[in-house]
Image (cartoon, rainbow, N blue to C red):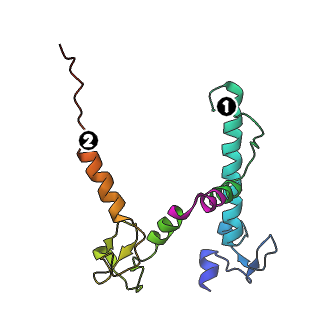
Amino acid sequence: MEHDKTKCQAPEGPILCINNCGFFGSAATMNMCSKCHKDMMLKQEQAKLDASSIGNLASGKGPVITGNADVGTGYLEAKSLLAQVSDESGSSDIREAKAEGPNRCNTCRKRVGLTGFRCRCGDLFCSVHRYSDKHVCPFDYQTSARNAIAKANPVVKAEKLDKI
């Protein structure tokens, strides 16, 4: 009875996504599920960026692309290329990936939070394993000390004097 006064209509039933993905859509997302709607918005945004970059290239304002470059490369393809490059670059990226998660001791896996100790080898340790003899530390302290001494004390050699 209240619906008659406000002239609001309740939906008759759940609406399936128009992309036939099996999830339910809504009128706010153009009868698509949230995932399909997000993908569509990303594609539209990427198409706008591609169109503007092509316009900049044609007018000479944008960067110059040389070689075999695909101008229409999508956002997800670029992201996968970056992931491949980071996988090939080495272990420094792996340590950065570990730092994104909770800070844990590399030996006992105890959570250390902000009180963790960084070793010269680059790993994070708790207060028990912070010393190099308490964990298997690959850092070469002896060579490092030799290099520091050599840098701090350069060899000073005077020129020979001509004997008269």
Q: Residues within 10 Å of mark 2 (few under 14, many from 20)?
A: few
At 37% from the left edge and 83% from the top edge, which residue is drawn?
111
Percent of width and height locating residue 76: 69, 58
Q: Is residue 47 magenta?
A: no
Of all residues, the one furthest to the right in this rendering is 20
At 70% from the left edge and 43% from the top edge, which residue is drawn?
50
Q: Quadrant of the C terminus?
A: top left
Left or right relative to 139: residue 39: right
The foreground one among 92 and 133 is 133
Percent of width and height locating residue 89: 59, 57
Which structural element holds mark 1?
A: loop
Q: Which residues are magenta?
A: 83-92
Per the image, the residue denoted by label 2 is 154
Q: Is residue 23 above or below residue 142?
A: below
Left or right relative to 109: residue 36: right
Q: Quadrant of residue 83?
A: bottom right
At 40% from the left edge and 86% from the top edge, which residue is drawn?
108
Which structural element holds mark 2?
A: loop
- Residue type pointed to by label 1: Val
Per the image, the residue denoted by label 1 is 64
Residues at marks 1 and 2, CA–CA distance in whole angstroms: 47 Å
Could you tell which of marks 1 and 2 lies nearer the N-terminus? Answer: 1
Percent of width and height locating residue 61: 62, 27
- Residue type pointed to by label 2: Pro
Q: Is residue 85 magenta?
A: yes
Q: Residues within 10 Å of mark 1 (few under 14, many from 20)?
A: few
